[in-house]
Image (cartoon, rainbow, N blue to C red):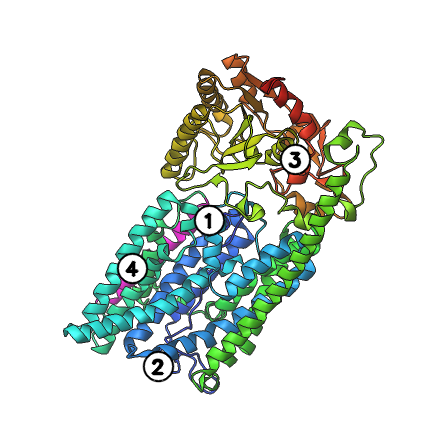
Amino acid sequence: MSATTLGSGSAGVGNPPGAPEGTSKPGRDPSRTDRGAVLRTDIQGLRAVAVSLVVIYHLVPSSLTGGFAGVDVFFVISGFLITLHLMQKPPAGGRDLAKFWGRRIRRLLPASLLVLATTLLLSRLAAPDTQWGNTSRQARAATLYVVNWLLARDSVDYLAAENAPSPVQHFWSLSVEEQFYFVWPILILGMVLLAGRLRWNRDIAVLGGLAVLVVVSLGYSVWETAHNPAAAYFVTPTRMWELGVGGLLAVVVAVRQRHSLPPLLSQTPRVVLAWAGFAAIAWTAWSYTGRTPFPGWQALLPVLGTALVIGAHSPMTRLSPGPLLALRPLQWLGDVSYSVYLWHWPLIVLIPQLRGHDLDTVDRVVALALTLVLAWLTKKYVEDRFRTPQWGIPLRKPFLLGAAGMAVVIALAGLQQLEVGQRQQRSEEKVAQAIANGGPCFGAAALEHPAACKPVPYDQIVPAPADAANDKSNAYGDVSGGKDCFSHVPSFRQVRCSFGAKRSKVEIALVGNSHAGQWLPTLERLAKRYHWHITTYLASQCAVARTRQAFPTRANTDACEAWVARTTRAVARSKPSAVVYTNRISVGAAGKSFEESGPLYRAGMESVLRTWDGAGLDVLVVRDTPAPDDLIPDCLAQHPDNVRACNGPRGTWLPKDQSQSAVQRVGSPRIRFLNLTDHICPTTTCDAVIGGVVTYFDGSHMTATYASTLDRYLGPPLRRLLGATR
């Protein structure tokens, strides 16, 4: 998986200091750290290589499809340098831990909080208001260094995964590293104390303990990547082993340094190992793609490659990579790489929004130039200043200052969230009033009188584009305040929800994936009118068709297949008065391209319909709705003076659908087909706004408001299916 799934895109680095603690200062030998240890130019150059991979990948993804692996290089570097520092002077108690964390705060927080605060302000000025809420939500989580868990949760949410990339989502890896910095010294302290209590050799105890952690974390990473790859990319347990590999190497190096042991290998083998490590990193960056299951065992290649480079400690000989890594440009880039990483992604996201078009060559050059300038300024005036000793005295000082800085950024994010909430409340009131007033030109009804219904001004459309993303059906728990009515990866557990009249002779089963869920507002309106009860059988992405669907992992495919079988049987046993059935086909059939999957989906739908026909059920099969595959609310917010810029051709938006063919092949009078496309895309064009109503809340699903205006077209055929006496 690439670092940008969710939309997006999004890889990150957490860059530790150039040596165990400190940096070169005026009047000192720049090749030495504050502790007098020689600064390893090979690691500094490796850091420059890693950040270059990430930046190139984000600027031009097609040029370096596996550039996201630069984050794995940084994880190993971080694990090595931090563990080396801890092993040189192991923590002996709480005060030592506080000193360690205080240095981490001074090293990382000032620059990161500056970038977060600046990004929030720039987003408010440059980004469309449709993105303010998500950006502030992620900025708050990034400030608390838990945004990786938020992104993991969003990544398995089919709808959240379609959100536009946030300018702060690259903080996910910084969150992983901060969690590592918190846990790692405690683990080492615990192992040191245990070794002393049991009279074990301290180094062997630490080495053995870390080895167990690495093995367990790697095993979990392999398992989770196979079963839930979207979340596996972000969560800390699947990444801890990468930092742990660097830690294991550091323990060995620390022991050899303590005993002044000579190098294990001569220069020639070290040169070979260093080049082999770089070859592994390069092969990863060149050959891996967003379709590569990651991290899992695939991450072994860049991780072990990085460990080889660090362990080889490239000698400064003619054929070694050492002299290349020591070149001043690479050393400078390695020195500012933390700030380079912090600034590059917000600029890549915000510059095209400010300029009003997709990222082009000029934007890329501007983003890169600004990144380097801002990184240099941040390194000189923020990073270096807060790393000086006076900012760590007294011991509580960095904690108090760090907490104050975090409070400021959280307050900024909170103010943005408050504004978003107030706007949303006003929009909801406006929507409720518009629905109550209705009229022949509201929503889908406007298509019946195109000449008489005038276009609605941007500031009067409902819901407001900034709030359209939340105008979803009550099947979504975050909207209804109740439970989530969708089954999700990885397990596709069985979920049912009830709506409408609690006691009714008419039971409607709504069955399918998210494109069935979008019809719930329509059915709720009908249920209120005719006193019906509705039960939902919904899944995210997984179509109700007896077809093996090509999810990212075999486990996901198996889970979807099992859910379809359970759901088909459950609906047949429940004997509803009628079934409303529809799906969006968004993944191909297993082993087939998307274009080749049509016949398999037709057969899979036909099998489901035959089961229900055999159970004596009446089924209304609704053709899948048009899907723009572009975030309509964002588009509208970017084109307030020309909403027609967000319209699209019916031939492109209307997906191929096998359901009508499946109905015809079953040939049962109990199973009927309904095509409502003309009430969404009336002619050759699909409109983003119809009758003053935003049609889609994302790039595929109808807003609840627009869906509710389709009741007059879904109601009659459904009532005919039910029969006049029901």
For the stretch drawn in magenta, the main secondary structure is helix
Check contact, mark 3 vs mark 4: CB within 8 A.
no
In the rendered structure, which disc, 1 or 4, sits on the residue that comes first in sequence? 1
Graded by Cα atoms within 10 Å as few (under 14), some (14 to 19) or many (20 or more), the crowding at tag 3 reads many
Given the image, on which type of amino acid does mark 3 rest? Answer: Ala
Q: Nearer the viewer, mark 1 or mark 2?
A: 2
Which of the marked residues, 2 or 3, is nearer the chain's N terminus? Answer: 2
Q: Earlier in the sequence, mark 4 or mark 2?
A: 2
- Given residues 366 and 379, the one toward you in this image is 379
| Dots 3, 1 in contact, CB < 8 A | no
Residue to which mark 1 is pinned: 2
Secondary structure at badge 4 equals helix
- Judge whether 166 appears above or below 712 on screen: below
Residue 103 position, x and y percent, is 42, 77
Asked which secondary structure carries label 3, the reply is helix
Magenta residues, as a range? 264-290
User: Mark on residue 707?
Assistant: 3
